[in-house]
Amino acid sequence: MKKLILIFFVIINTFIFSEEYVSGKITAKLGSVKENNLVTDMELTEETEDIVVYEIKTGNEIVNVESPVYSDKSLNINFKAGDRVILMKDEYEDGRTTYFITDTDKRISYAALSLIFIIFTVAMAKIKGVKALFALGVSVAAIFYFFLPLVLKGYSPIFLSVVTALFSSVVTIYFIAGFSRKGINAVIGSIGGVIFSGILSAYFTNKMGLTGYSTVDAVGYVGILGNIKVKELISAGIILGSMGAVMDVAMSISSSLTELKEKNPNLLPKEIFTSGINIGRDIVGTMINTLILAYIGSSLFDILIISIHINELPVARLFNFEFIAVEILKSFSGSIGILVAIPITAYLSSYMGTERNILDDKK
């Protein structure tokens, strides 16, 4: 995931500013070449079976734009009047200008989804929801304005991901719990979990000989990635990807044990620690499922393609594809990070504010 974001930014910086893209609104569908005998600049090819002409308003200008209709129906987008699209503007030396539809303009959909998300969050969590949204914004900003720019400059993605995870944990938990004991316990527990995940993933990245170029398409970006430590992006992605789940578990345990201590101050630290482990056991099953299923879901297309060719691939070859190894590494390293965060958080929550350490506590 984070590797794709990095590649996206590299492509943006390298290519996108050499072309001009504008947003437009389809006002009418003028018809197709075959149905209306329209004359267009485009020619039919083996991949296309027709050409449709749309009338599109972009700024103060009305333009006619040709769009191919592909023989493979799954490749077509059925535009209609009122749809907003992205156009690529191509200017020729003779002064002629042509436009091509590159895609639908998805920004309105993004805004609608964001608004629905914000409404539900605030409705369910009230002021804590507002704080959580602010913390999320800060975390995302840290990734895009701190992590990615420094990675592009050649700094270690693993180190930067740890710093970003620490910053995000502190900000998020501060807005949820403040600089309280339970907040500090949760921060330390979550950071312990993600650092362990990072160390584990870094070890197995080298052990399995992973390069960071997990797909054939990724290899094509070798020339534009410069001095970026691509291999370290695997571990960095695991640290950032598991951060939210580990933080959730750490905060849940810390909050539960703090409440338990406040309700019954006579409990011994060892009893509180045992309760924390028991709470962690109840949480861990669903949380690990959440994390692993999220990674599987993000690779669903690749998994589907493999399933189609499963009988043609030897097991030895199948499990040695790099992109499969990376997803397996992400799933297990992230889940182990959750398991590590549980005893760390439970341990800290059991003795902070008490006079005794659980290792010295005897029943």
Image (tube, rainbow, N blue to C red):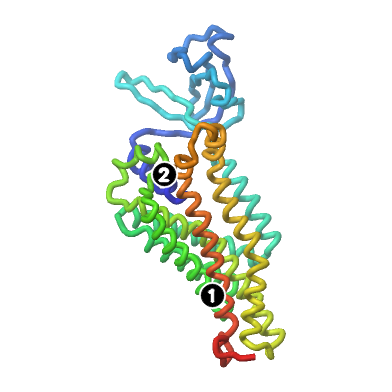
For residue 88, the mark is none
- What's the residue at 60%, 75% (across, down)? 254
Q: Secondary structure at mark 1?
A: helix
Q: Amino acid at mark 1?
A: Ile
Q: Position of residue 10 (x, y in %)?
A: 36, 45
Residue 52 vertical position relative to residue 58 in the rendered view, above or below: above
- Alpha carbon of mark 2 to alpha carbon of mark 1: how far? 33 Å
- What's the residue at 48%, 22% (across, down)? 63
- Circle 2 residues within 10 Å: few <14, some 14–19, many ≥20: some
Residue 286 vertical position relative to residue 28 in the rendered view, above or below: below
Residue 180 vertical position relative to residue 45 in the rendered view, above or below: below
Q: Secondary structure at mark 2?
A: loop
**Residue situated in front as seen by the camera: 64 or 170:** 170
Q: Is residue 267 left or right of residue 216?
A: right
Q: Position of residue 156 (x, y in %)?
A: 33, 59
Quadrant location of the C terminus in the rendered image: bottom right
Q: In this view, which residue lies farthest toward the top?
A: 37
**Quadrant of residue 54 within the rendered picture:** top right
Q: Amino acid at mark 2?
A: Ser
Residue 213 vertical position relative to residue 126 in the rendered view, above or below: above
**Residue situated in front as seen by the camera: 353 or 107:** 353
Q: Position of residue 180 (x, y in %)?
A: 57, 80
For residue 344, the mark is 1
In the picture of the structure, the residue carrying the numbered disc 2 is 214
- Circle 1 residues within 10 Å: few <14, some 14–19, many ≥20: many
- What's the residue at 53%, 54% (across, down)? 331
